[in-house]
Image (spheres, helix red, strand yellow):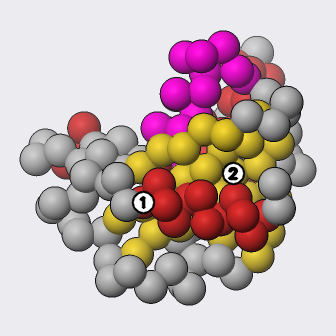
Amino acid sequence: MSFDELFEEAVKASERSYSKYSGFSVGAALITADGRLYTGCNIENSSYSLTNCAERTAVFKAVSDGYTKFSAIAVAGSGSGDFSKPCYPCGACLQVLSEFCEDDFTVVLSDGTHKLSDFLPMRFSEESMK
């Protein structure tokens, strides 16, 4: 699957967003190391801190199915249906991705591809706990 196709899967996933409070729909499309596709959307809650982001939804779905190795994720978000502006992953999502992905893990946004380390250069890891 090309990165453009992966991004389109993220846009499709955003259509299932439950974002009645913010009106900002986000979708994520995650590829496992063996090529399986997992998608996720943001799921809001009236108690805002209980909201779950699209990226974490996709990762948690994959992990719950036994997958912990990933090759790329695409993220698409919009409040207007225009997905041309990049929707950057939040810090919590970046930290969750860093649990399973190396620094060179690919993050696909509307403005192109990035590496996880571009967004989270000094992550908290297992090594941080020693």
Q: Nearer the viewer, residue 109 or 116?
A: 109
Q: Give the magenta range.
A: 55-68
Q: Residue at x 31, y 69 (%)?
A: 24
**Badge number at residue 14:** 1
The image shows residue 45 at horizontal and vertical percentages of: 17, 44
**Three-letter code, disc 2:** Ile
Question: How busy is the neighbourhood of tag 2: few (under 14 within 10 Å), some, or many (20 plus)?
Answer: many
Q: Residue at x 56, y 85 (%)?
A: 84
99 vs 117: above or below: above
Q: Quadrant of the C terminus?
A: top right
Is there any visible trace of residue 89 in the rendered image? Answer: no
The image shows residue 19 at horizontal and vertical percentages of: 24, 58
91 vs 95: above or below: below
Name the residue that disc number 2 marks.
73
At mark 1, the secondary structure is helix
Q: Residue at x 72, y 64 (%)?
A: 5
